[in-house]
Amino acid sequence: MSDRDFTIGATRRAFQGHVFAVDVADVEYADGTRVTRDLIRHPGAVAIVAYDEHAVYLTRQPRPAIGDPDSLELPAGLLDHAGEGPLATAKRELAEEIGKAAAHWEFVVRFRTTVGVSDEETHLFAATGLRDEAADSGEDERIEIVPWPLADLDGALAASRDAKTLIGLTWLRERLG
Amino acid sequence: MSDRDFTIGATRRAFQGHVFAVDVADVEYADGTRVTRDLIRHPGAVAIVAYDEHAVYLTRQPRPAIGDPDSLELPAGLLDHAGEGPLATAKRELAEEIGKAAAHWEFVVRFRTTVGVSDEETHLFAATGLRDEAADSGEDERIEIVPWPLADLDGALAASRDAKTLIGLTWLRERLG
């Protein structure tokens, strides 16, 4: 046991939203200290670095949470379909968001987006061997597809302020290095 | 105007926590479509890549939100002191979390941690010219300081699952490359 070990005790759901919930939880450390923490419960997400010999396929989409109508990002989506794993979600989102299927899929990394307050985890994949395969999400997504030249990955990194996109494009720059 | 432009209308505070709040907001797009979104309001944070000729200074700390008692991360902290800008917060957190001051500070990048649901922004700095300068946060932080050898940055990248830490250590690997 270290003084960092803890158990989570009584938990009260304080907010239930469409994407995430908030729990107020009692946290007890191994030394007996008790604290209360507000914990965001999020289903997790996938993001995809989809590229061919010319371009990486990005999106622009409105993000009310950050007040940005034109957020430049990797294609991505929530793990919100029961029983659908991260890779299957990534395949579905790639078709829905940029109208592509991929012959080759590679797991890159998974990471927690904001460890202080949320359990959100993002699974990052790379997709190559792309072909057209449109799918309709049935949602009002307002997404513009942006094929960004591989020769200007630095420009994409400068133009995006989204953590998953920075991680994915930095990975791609090293891969292509 | 594009079909991605929106305005945020009536907003109701649905949860007020210690670190963040949740607003339920009406969002109206330029074409008249209206949707409701749950928006996390977060004060923002800083993170620091502090390194000398031998090591980068990481921390291990308990993170109840992800169920991890030993999360390996860059030193970091919330922008929760009124009137204190990101660089001043970074300097304070470096002293509180790893007991160091730095002669040289460099802004690296700022990014949004989870654009779908939260306005949280993290400001990433690099700090060099380190010297000992302990400060007591007055908080129960349970933080272990982990000097990680620069020769094994790949090992730190493999051992951390925290987005800000992946972004910071990847930046450092390129910088030292």
Image (spheres, coloured by chain):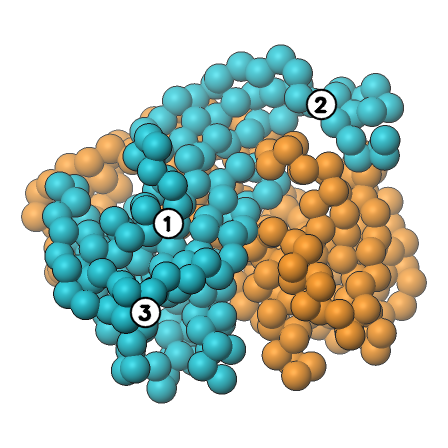
Chain colours: A orange, B cyan
Residue contact between numbered discs 1 and 2, judged by CB atoms under 8 Å: no
Q: Is residue A92 visible?
A: no
> Residue B7 got which mark?
2
Q: Badge 3 sits on which subunit?
A: B
B85 above or below B47? above
Can you see residue A17? Answer: yes
Left or right of B111: which side holds B87?
left
Q: Amino acid at mark 1?
A: Leu
Determine whether the residue tagged by mark 2 lies in a helix, strand or loop. strand
Question: Between disc 3 and disc 1, whose residue precedes?
Answer: 1
Q: Are marks 3 and 1 on the same chain?
A: yes
Disc 3 is placed on an element classified as: strand
- The residue that mark 3 highlights is B128
> What is the spatial separation of the Cα atoms under label 1 and label 2, in whole angstroms?
31 Å
* SS at mark 1 in the image: helix
Q: CA distance from mark 3 to mark 1?
A: 14 Å
State the mark number for residue B87.
1
In the image: residue B4, left or right of residue B39: right
